[in-house]
Image (tube, rainbow, N blue to C red):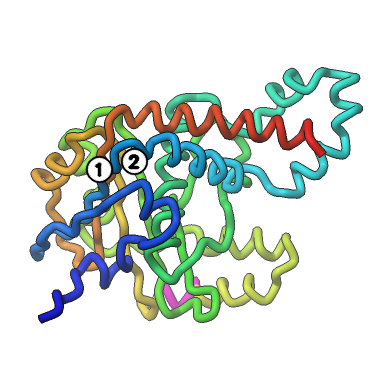
Amino acid sequence: MEKSESIQCRLIGQHPKTSLFAEWLTHEDISSSPTKIHRTLIEKQGMREFAIEQISDWILTHHIAESTLVRLKRKREKIIKKYGLDEYLNQQQMLPIAEKTMRGNGAEIILAEYLQESSPLEILLYKLRYNPNVSQSIKGDDVLLFNRKNLSEQIILGESKFRKVPNKAVVEEITDEFGKKLKLPLSILFIANRLSELGDEELADELEDLNIEVKHGKVPVINVGFLLSNHNTKSNVEKNLHSKNPNFIFVSLGIDQPEELISKSFSLANDKFKRGIENE
């Protein structure tokens, strides 16, 4: 007899069978209850450097538009002559350098990419590119995914957290956000406005209409909480997770030295960004 599909799979899809997440992580869909739906992710031994390489690419994609890289390449010789490339890029600060912001953004990016792999939905806009102050976390929904071909089919709304050490407080912070009742997205019009500025008026119009449908409760919304922390993450989530929202799933990723994963990924992203400008 085939094993029945887990509630975790029904909410966000199966753990990816290809891509970084299949190579880097295994998973466990823990037995659910009316108050707890939890998927835990486990790092495979020896795969940390492989993950850092891929995450660094995602960091660049989420923070910096291709047009920005093209513009900096065009101005490269002028920049080097007038300022020096390192000085110029340090002053422009296109990637965060504050540890808190890097960790928050890093967790958000990992969650966004994971959900794009596990579900049929996708990100329509890399919102971190529009942060007016890269040193601070950007406001609004952390992760918002849609079916581009049928926007009203389903939306996934995700909230991510990073902690060096997990505790009851961070689990309760996430469940306060999602576990009491279904949370609806707040950033649909922000995405619509940015897409309109980019010239995608048709999709922007559809998102404006979708925003009304969502507020009227006509669009299925899945809430996802994500915690990236150390090896004790799974047990802390299991002990402290209590939800009244049947459309809320908690995804946890517990690894040794999670701060190292983020710091090394951002450091490599910075190196790649600089090399991308230096090289034709």
Judged left or right of residue 170, residue 153 is right
Judged left or right of residue 67, residue 150 is left
Q: Vertically, is 16 above or below 80? A: below
Q: Amino acid at mark 2?
A: Lys
Q: Quadrant of the C terminus?
A: top right
Residue 265 at x, y percent in the picture? 49, 33
Residue 19 at x, y percent in the picture? 44, 56
Q: Amino acid at mark 1?
A: Glu
Q: Vertically, is 253 above or below 212? A: above
Are the residues at dot 1 and dot 2 in contact (C-beta closer than 8 Å)? yes
Q: Residue under label 1, please give it.
A: 173
Q: How many circles with numbers are drawn on the protein?
A: 2
> Residue at the spot x=40%, y=42% of the render?
107
Judged left or right of residue 176, residue 139 is right
Residue numbers of the magenta segment: 211-215
Instruction: Please tell me which residue lies in front, 158 or 269.
Output: 269
Residue 213 at x, y percent in the picture? 45, 78
Q: Vertically, is 104 above or below 218? A: above
Q: Quadrant of residue 118?
A: bottom left
Q: Marks 1 and 2, Cα distance to the nearest angstrom? A: 9 Å
Give the numbered dot on residue 161. Answer: 2
**Precedes in sequence: disc 1 or disc 2:** 2
> Residue at the spot x=14%, y=57% of the render?
30
Considering every residue shown, the one lying at the far front of the view is 46
Q: Is residue 215 visible?
A: no
